Amino acid sequence: MLSVLVVDADDDALKTIGEILHGAGIGASLASTGLHALTLFRRVLVDVVVVDLRLSDFGGIELLRAFRDERAGVPVIVTGVGSPGAAIEAGRLGAADYLEKPVHADQLIDAVLSHVPLHHLKSDDAPPPGWTNPQVVHAVRAIDDRYWDAQLTVRALARELGVSTEHLCRLLKRQTGGTFVALLRRARVRAACRLLTTTTLCMKEIAAHVGFSSPNRFARDFRKLCGVTPSEYRVGALRDAVPHETDVHAIVSES
């Protein structure tokens, strides 16, 4: 199960964010102070941190630096009251993302899942409990089966199902926590992982085989999900520095 550390001095906000994550099948450790957060960070292997930096015992930059010093590479999503410079300031402090309060469930889940490197997702991660709508199941299976088709679109899938594009987009977002584009990207990158470790195809050939419109797009999306370039992944796999494809299970409902 994915694990998120949530840090917020506001007990109501802390409880709400925790409930949203648990409802999506994501584990959440909760802390109301910076000291407690660092204690949990050292004890629990977390994939993402969600933090409101307005804490009584830690300044924002000190806490982010402490997270980085303890374990570099863990994405930190900052939450807070929106202001013209809030997102800029969060980025300056090293945050991977910024969410305004009140935090909405779909935005939170999408932000968390978009910052989890692909090789952090395990095969025993379960999809959200509400993932039972037959239209969603059909769409996800179609993505799994036809990710290689560069012409696969949400509009085409909606037409197959006899529903509007907007309706299908809402269903996917509500039940999987991700968009059609995110689900398709994850399926394509997973397939690319297999080709990188089992063939000698060049990057351009792999990009075309798994449905990417260009090698540059392939490289950008791969790095976003895996945390390394396709070439680095291939070299690392040969040296057992990164998991083999059989251990890189992208749960399509978590995109």
Image (cartoon, helix red, strand yellow):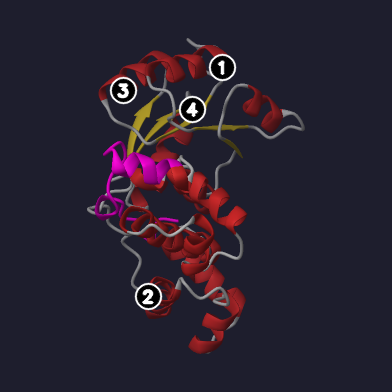
Quick check: can you spot residue 39?
A: yes
Task: Give the image location of residue 128, x and y in percent.
Answer: 34, 59
Amino acid at dot 3 = Leu
Q: Quadrant of residue 200?
A: bottom left
Q: Nearer the viewer, mark 4 or mark 2?
A: 2
Q: Nearer the viewer, mark 4 or mark 3?
A: 3
Residue marked by disc 3: 40
Residue marked by disc 2: 141
Q: Secondary structure at mark 1?
A: helix
Q: Could you tell me if the residues under marks 1 and 4 are in contact, i.e. CB atoms within 8 Å?
A: no
Mark 4, Cα crowd under 10 Å, few <14 / some 14-19 / many 20+, is few
Which of marks 3 and 4 precedes in the sequence?
4
Please tell me whether residue 49 is drawn above or below residue 111 in the rendered image: above
Please tell me whether residue 254 is drawn above or below residue 22 in the rendered image: below
Mark 3, Cα crowd under 10 Å, few <14 / some 14-19 / many 20+, is some
Q: Could you tell me if the residues under marks 3 and 1 are in contact, i.e. CB atoms within 8 Å?
A: no
Task: Identify the residue at horizontal 49%, vertical 27% (top origin).
Answer: 10
The disc at residue 60 is: 1
Q: CA distance from mark 2 to mark 1?
A: 43 Å
Amino acid at dot 4 = Asp
Amino acid at dot 2 = Arg
| Magenta range | 232-255
Q: Could you tell me if the residues under marks 4 and 2 are in contact, i.e. CB atoms within 8 Å?
A: no
Which of marks 2 and 4 precedes in the sequence?
4
Which of marks 1 and 2 precedes in the sequence?
1
Quick check: can you spot residue 27?
A: no
Task: Give the image location of residue 197, x and y in percent.
Answer: 33, 53
Q: Could you tell me if the residues under marks 2 and 1 are in contact, i.e. CB atoms within 8 Å?
A: no
Residue marked by disc 4: 10
Q: CA distance from mark 3 to mark 2?
A: 37 Å
Q: Quadrant of residue 252?
A: bottom left
Q: Secondary structure at mark 2?
A: helix
